[in-house]
């Protein structure tokens, strides 16, 4: 991905065809996230069983960055332990602030393609929305 081009193929694909954007039946955790600076809003739902996120879904609306980043996040944390998901959320936030080492980013999979957003301060909150919402839910688990 060209440095500064945040609209990677993965971002565009997850925005156009999100796999995790749907209303979940019987979630164990739900939290609403809002980005007041540009109007993005999501409702994140998780099903956590025995310390494992067995399902992650979201509904809402917003820009391509917020919606794709949330879909990428949902894919990454599904079937992971709460502890692993928290580690990935912390790592993503570190990356988006421009503080992560390159060797750490492999753990983020496709989410690492959003690294260039760190260079675009106006888009950072968009990319963080799903991750911050997940963080609130996971911290309630601790």
Image (cartoon, helix red, strand yellow):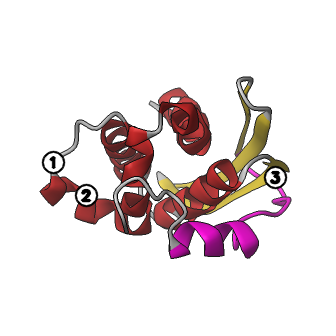
- Kindly indicate whether the residue at mark 2 contacts the one at mark 3 (C-beta within 8 angstroms): no
Please state, as top left, top right, bottom left or bottom right, where the N terminus lies in the image: bottom left
- Kindly indicate whether the residue at mark 1 contacts the one at mark 3 (C-beta within 8 angstroms): no
Q: Is residue 64 visible?
A: yes
Magenta span contains residue 84: no
Figure quadrant of residue 36: top right
Name the residue carrying label 1: 101
Nearest the eye: 100 or 82: 100
Name the residue carrying label 2: 105
| Whole-percent x, y for residue 104 in the image | 19, 54
Name the residue carrying label 3: 59
| Whole-percent x, y for residue 40 in the image | 76, 38
Going from N to C along the chain, the mark reached first, 3 or 1, is 3
Please state, as top left, top right, bottom left or bottom right, where the C terminus lies in the image: top left
Q: CA distance from mark 2 to mark 1?
A: 7 Å
- Kindly indicate whether the residue at mark 1 contacts the one at mark 2 (C-beta within 8 angstroms): yes
């Amino acid at each position: 991905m060209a440095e500064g081009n945040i609209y990677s193929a993965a971002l565009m694909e997850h925005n156009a065809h999100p796999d995790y954007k749907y209303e979940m039946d019987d979630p164990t955790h739900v939290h609403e996230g809002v980005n007041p600076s540009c109007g993005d809003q999501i409702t994140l739902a998780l099903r956590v069983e025995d310390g494992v996120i067995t399902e992650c879904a979201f509904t809402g609306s917003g820009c391509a960055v917020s919606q794709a980043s949330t879909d990428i996040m949902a894919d990454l944390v599904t079937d992971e332990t709460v502890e692993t998901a928290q580690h990935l959320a912390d790592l993503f936030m570190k990356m988006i602030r421009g503080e992560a080492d390159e060797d750490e980013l492999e753990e983020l999979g496709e989410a690492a393609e959003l690294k260039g957003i760190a260079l675009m301060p106006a888009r950072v909150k968009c990319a963080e929305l799903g991750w911050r919402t997940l963080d609130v839910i996971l911290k309630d688990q601790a």
